[in-house]
Image: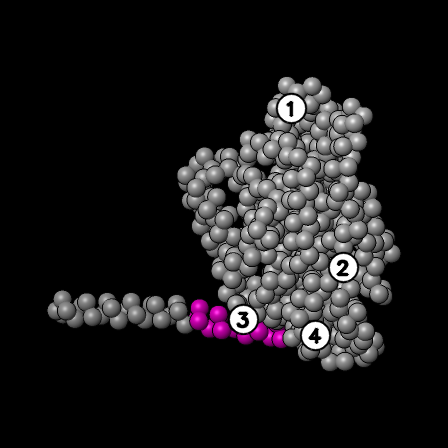
């Protein structure tokens, strides 16, 4: 046998071996795919039968909002209640449901919290589905690969929600994009989403690539080029999955220009995506006259006294809000004011925010400790989960509104400060930079900063302005935020959701 014939025989044997291995694998894959298809089809049929049974019982379609932290008291929760109120006013023959993971509270307590914190009263009750496994989306459950862990956890939490109540229309109002395919393909629902903040963004990728330590990029990773490279690959893979999940949404609403850019890049659904600015309760502050500060300071100068300026921050006590930066910058401001007679006593910092869980409460304790460590504990006040009227009072009496989150998606607290008449000092990034603290009528509406020194410098600059100069800035700021009112939000939200609501069979 020639060498050529021997080689041909070897190749034939190799092909037969590969075929003998590939054919069973192909058949196995075909069987498993068929079983998976049958399983998905069976689950979908079961869920649709549940929906039909519920529809025949209730006689009306149902719209469900996925908001596991609906009792948290932040800006995202205000969007939820304003959205439901707008839809209830427009569609009287539709039921509304909220999936929440809040345990130990009743529906009445949740709605009462919305009334106290946001001054929002719903036209009629909503149904709450209390989920038992919210722990699956808690960040502290996943010390590593947190984004992936929380997203996978949201799949299971979404499954619990879907099997507990199968709606006709599903709206994710908290940013859990991985629940969208669950409701669309298993539940057979039309789906929509309101995105406050993309789960991953190109900015997060740049932080890792540049090995920049931040709250979401630990020092041990930023200091190690190998770990940083691995995290970049992980982020890129996750961004691909996130984009696929988000693209399942029939209607996409985003809360700012900054968020719009990232969602368009990741979800690639420009024809279904629109900006719907979140509702800010600017109307509640418009009745407060802005001239009071000037008159008050004139009176104090006449009496020989000195006004104590209040610097107020409104933000949930989450790590990304960067309260540490506020306290450290305030310490530098006090160092600058210390050289003046009574300078230290002429200013105080008030930190107002909500605590969602024990982790947030631990963060507040840490911040209190930082205040005492820096020697500013006597000039810093913490006000947690306060009612709306007290929040309004603090903002109206404040001189400066403080915001420090890097790449804040929007900034409802920033808008509320401007509407209340404070001179806002926000982070030079994200929504505040692109949408809110922008020139109006040819003049300033506030100030921006990005580190301890610049924050301290601008705070001192604001406090040194004459009351009349501050008054001009406050007037322009108040006029500029009218586009973020509840009425504007309701009109934009109803217009964006009209294609979805029009599909409901009544």
Residue at the disc numbered 2:
81
Q: CA distance from mark 3 to mark 4?
A: 18 Å
Asked whether residue 33 is drawn in magenta, I would say: yes
- Say if 401 sits above or below 49 in the image: above
| Residue at the image point whose x is 57% and y is 63% from the top | 246
Choose top left, top right, bottom left or bottom right for residue 94. bottom right
Region of the chain picked out in magenta, as a range: 24-43
Ranked by sequence position, the earlier of labels 4 and 1 is 1
Choose top left, top right, bottom left or bottom right for residue 228. top left
Ranked by sequence position, the earlier of labels 2 and 1 is 2
Q: Nearer the viewer, residue 1 or 214?
A: 214
Q: In the visual, does 153 lie left or right of 261?
A: right
Q: Nearer the viewer, residue 227 or 98?
A: 98
Residue at the disc numbered 3:
271
Q: CA distance from mark 2 to mark 1?
A: 42 Å
- Count of marks overlaid on the render: 4
Tag in front: 3 or 1: 1
Ranked by sequence position, the earlier of labels 3 and 2 is 2
- Say if 205 sits above or below 24 in the image: above
Q: Main secondary structure of the magenta part?
A: helix
- Say if 463 sits above or below 497 in the image: above
Asked whether residue 339 is drawn in magenta, I would say: no
Q: In the visual, does 11 lie left or right of 282?
A: left
| Residue at the image point whose x is 57% and y is 74% from the top | 37
Q: CA distance from mark 3 to mark 2?
A: 26 Å
Secondary element type, mark 1:
helix
For the question of whether residue 147 can be seen, the reply is no
Ranked by sequence position, the earlier of labels 2 and 4 is 2
Secondary element type, mark 2:
helix
Residue at the disc numbered 1:
337
Q: Quadrant of the C terminus?
A: bottom right
């Amino acid at each position: 046998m020639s060498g050529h014939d021997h080689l041909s025989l070897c190749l034939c044997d190799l092909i037969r071996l590969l075929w003998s291995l590939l054919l069973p694998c192909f058949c196995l894959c075909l069987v498993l795919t068929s079983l998976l298809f049958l399983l998905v089809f069976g689950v979908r049929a079961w869920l649709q039968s549940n929906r039909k049974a519920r529809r025949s019982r209730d006689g009306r379609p149902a719209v469900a909002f996925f908001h596991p932290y609906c009792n948290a008291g932040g800006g995202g929760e205000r969007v939820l209640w304003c959205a439901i109120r707008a839809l209830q006013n427009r569609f009287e023959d539709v039921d509304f449901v909220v999936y929440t993971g809040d345990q130990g509270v009743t529906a009445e307590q949740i709605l009462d919290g919305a009334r106290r914190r946001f001054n929002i009263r719903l036209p009629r009750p909503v149904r709450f589905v209390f989920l038992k496994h919210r722990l699956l989306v808690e960040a502290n459950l996943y010390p590593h690969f947190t984004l992936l862990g929380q997203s996978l956890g949201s799949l299971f939490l979404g499954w619990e929600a879907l099997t507990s109540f199968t709606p006709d229309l599903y709206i994710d109002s908290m940013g859990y994009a991985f629940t969208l395919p669950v409701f669309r393909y298993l539940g057979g629902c039309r789906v929509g989403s309101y995105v406050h903040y993309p789960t991953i963004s190109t900015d997060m990728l740049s932080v890792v690539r540049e090995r920049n330590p931040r709250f979401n990029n630990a020092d041990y990773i930023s200091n190690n080029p190998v770990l940083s490279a691995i995290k970049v690959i992980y982020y890129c893979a996750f961004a691909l999955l996130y984009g696929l999940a988000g693209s399942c949404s029939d209607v996409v609403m985003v809360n700012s220009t900054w968020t719009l850019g990232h969602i368009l890049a990741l979800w690639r659904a420009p024809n279904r995506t629109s900006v719907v600015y979140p509702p800010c309760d600017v109307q509640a502050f418009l009745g407060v006259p802005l001239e009071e500060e000037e008159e008050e300071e004139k009176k104090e100068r006449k009496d020989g006294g000195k006004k104590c300026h209040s610097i107020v921050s409104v933000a949930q006590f989450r790590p990304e809000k960067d309260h540490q930066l506020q306290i450290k910058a305030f310490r530098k401001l006090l160092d600058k004011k210390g050289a003046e007679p009574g300078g230290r006593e002429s200013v105080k910092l008030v930190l107002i925010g909500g605590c969602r869980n024990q982790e947030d409460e631990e963060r507040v304790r840490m911040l209190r400790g930082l205040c005492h460590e820096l020697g500013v504990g006597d000039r810093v006040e913490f006000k947690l989960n306060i009612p709306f009227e007290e929040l309004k009072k603090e903002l109206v009496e404040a001189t400066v509104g403080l915001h420090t989150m890097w790449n804040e998606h929007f900034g409802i607290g920033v808008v509320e400060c401007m509407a209340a008449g404070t001179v806002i000092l926000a982070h030079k990034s994200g929504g505040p930079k692109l949408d809110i603290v922008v020139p109006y009528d040819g003049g300033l509406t506030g100030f921006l900063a990005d580190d301890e020194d610049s924050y301290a410098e601008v705070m001192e600059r604001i406090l040194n302005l004459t009351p009349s100069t501050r008054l001009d800035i406050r007037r322009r700021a108040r006029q500029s935020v009218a586009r973020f009112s509840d009425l504007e939000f309701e009109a934009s939200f109803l217009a964006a959701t009209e294609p979805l609501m029009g599909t409901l069979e009544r």
